Image (spheres, rainbow, N blue to C red):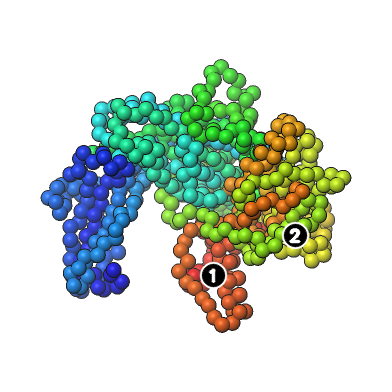
Amino acid sequence: RVKDAKQITAYQVIVRRYNDCADCNDHRDLIIAWDSGKVDIPHDEDFPSSVKWSPGEINANNTPHNSSPHPGEIFLWKVILWDMASRPHSSLSWSKFAIGPNDDSEWRGNWITHPLDMHTFHVSSSTNDEKILDECELWHKRRSLPLFRALLSAETLTTVLDGDDDFVTSALLVISGLGSYRVSIDGVPLSSSGPIDPPFTDYSKRVMYRGFDVTSFITNQQPIRNKDIEQSHVIGVTVASGWWDHRPLNSGLIRFDLLPRGPVTIVAQLYITTSKGSVHTVIPTEGTAMKEFWQVSKGPIRESDLFTGEIVDLGVLSAMEGWDTFESWIEIEENVSFEENQSKVGYWVIPTLYRTNITREIRMEEMAILAKAMNQEDRKTQHREFEIVASPIGKLVPSEIPPVMPMERIHPDEVHDLGSGRWLFDFGKGMSGMLHFDSGLPSPIVPPNAEYPRGHGFQVATAIGDSFITIIYGDSLEMSTGDINRVLVAGVGLHDGGPRHFSEPKGAQDFTPCFPPDQDGTLSQRDVYIVPKSIGDDLEEKRNIFSLARQSHFTTHGFRFAEVCCTDQPPPNVTALLYRTAVDERGSFDSSNVIINGGYELVRNALNSNMLSVQSDCPHREKLPYGGDLVAESPVAMHM
């Protein structure tokens, strides 16, 4: 192994086309896409930081290079290094990379959304709090959150590959979604990322996308040509609000009006590459492909918000099980009234294209005026009322940072019975993430006199007889009551003081526009799992449905403590998942002083808790990547 770049005297880069089928290599002279040959490094030059792919040259085997790589191709590559004794060194395995679309012209797919969501994103003529209330009503109409799916049928694949008799060697799905998304194929999850993907950026300027290698699903690791294709596939996309279609709260801590907003939306396309390097684009999210390939329906996530948590309908989750498989695919009925069925959960409709009247130039000027960096009279675009006020969506770029992933699983140190079916879990340290229920949740109970502990009530469900379980998260405990101090972690600072805090009077949030009900005056980190009354009174069936609960999907919470309410016994096999951007921890520190070691751990936990795509200022109250925090803490982060 060469440990020092100064010891390297030469290098060789070899790139070959990815082929998931060991028996498909009938064009072995074309497998090597590029070979730099051995390149000597002059003694007075440093080791190069990059090497340019040079098409048209002759490789080491005297075989012409392929042309420049095309979007959609997947490659394997390896580097060979020579040390000062002219001994070659190379890794045993090949690394993989893919070529994605680099500009808008290489995207056939367009942004698509649920028709109801697009329809409810229009301008309000109201002002101030009335406008917020109007936006809140429209926001509620967009609940539940949608599921998208696309059919990649055997017939479609055969037609696309007609005239190309070579073996299918790779398949690359490129996709993005706003606010957050997760993707699957044939019911198998593809996304390694957690609750925040794409990473936080100004989405009106740029949005990051990811690529997923789905070759093994298409080829089943067998030699396959167009005439051999028999299996159909379904791609599924689950989406949530994220920073894109958040609850329209009016708060002094966060200027939500400065953030771009729009209905949740996705863009996608699939590349199929054959053994001679031909690349075919299939099932893009575009107008002509919409009716034939893509469908959208409201799903089991009733609400998902970065500050108020998630509400999941486990009854719908159970009923829609397998929605992203070919066995569950159904053709959309013709002559059915869309207006009557568009909001139904589990009712599939054709998506519509995302649209807006606001250009990027108009938005940039509006932001400059709000920031007092431009005067109203200096704007170059015409100021007028717009029919559709959804934000423009920026340029699609490949993801530039690792995904947010569960990096640590933590077992509780203690579990306390707080009475009335409420259980307090103490995990011993602060983190950003959520609870995970390996065995699901037990059946809920109703507390004595139906009086739910503070923050755990859910009047909408109680009024119609639905069963539910709530989870509340927090960093510390109330000294007087022994339960979670929700005020200190109140979302965007909205609270009424709680049992003993006097910074805000009781009832302070009673008239805050779009403040969620059943939060008892404090915007809480809370997840709710519901089983509707329509399931019936069969206790065994309810128990089975509650056992489907695992964790929240698209939100994280800052916490050390978590309350689960209300159940006879604490849920079994509960762990906490610590989520953060999946960067390597390279630094470490240890000393003989316990206090200093503890201080180091506090700083480490704080950095980990705030590294959700880019670093934020706190993992619960604000969650925003303020530049001051980044500058002040960057030396510490670089050490770790």
Dividing the picture into quadrants, the one containing residue 154 is top left
For disc 1, the marked residue is: 633
Q: Say above or below: 350 vs 134.
A: above
Question: Left or right: where does residue 246 sit relative to residue 209?
Answer: right
Q: Position of residue 322 (x, y in %)?
A: 54, 34
* Residue at point 73%, 31% (across, down): 536
* Residue at point 22%, 63% (across, down): 11
**Residue 234 at least partly seen:** yes
Outermost residue toward the top in this view: 335
The amino acid type found where label 1 is placed reads Glu
10 Å crowding of disc 2: few (<14), some (14-19), many (20+): some
**Residue 504 at least partly seen:** no
For disc 2, the marked residue is: 416
10 Å crowding of disc 1: few (<14), some (14-19), many (20+): few
Question: Which of 284 and 460 lies nearest the eye of the viewer?
Answer: 460
* Residue at point 41%, 50% (across, down): 398
How far is the residue under mark 2 from the one under mark 1?
36 Å
Quarter the N terminus occupies: bottom left
Question: Left or right: where does residue 134 sit relative to residue 601?
Answer: right
Q: Position of residue 338 (x, y in %)?
A: 59, 23
The amino acid type found where label 2 is placed reads His
Label 2: which secondary element = strand
Badge 2 or badge 1: first in the primary sequence: 2
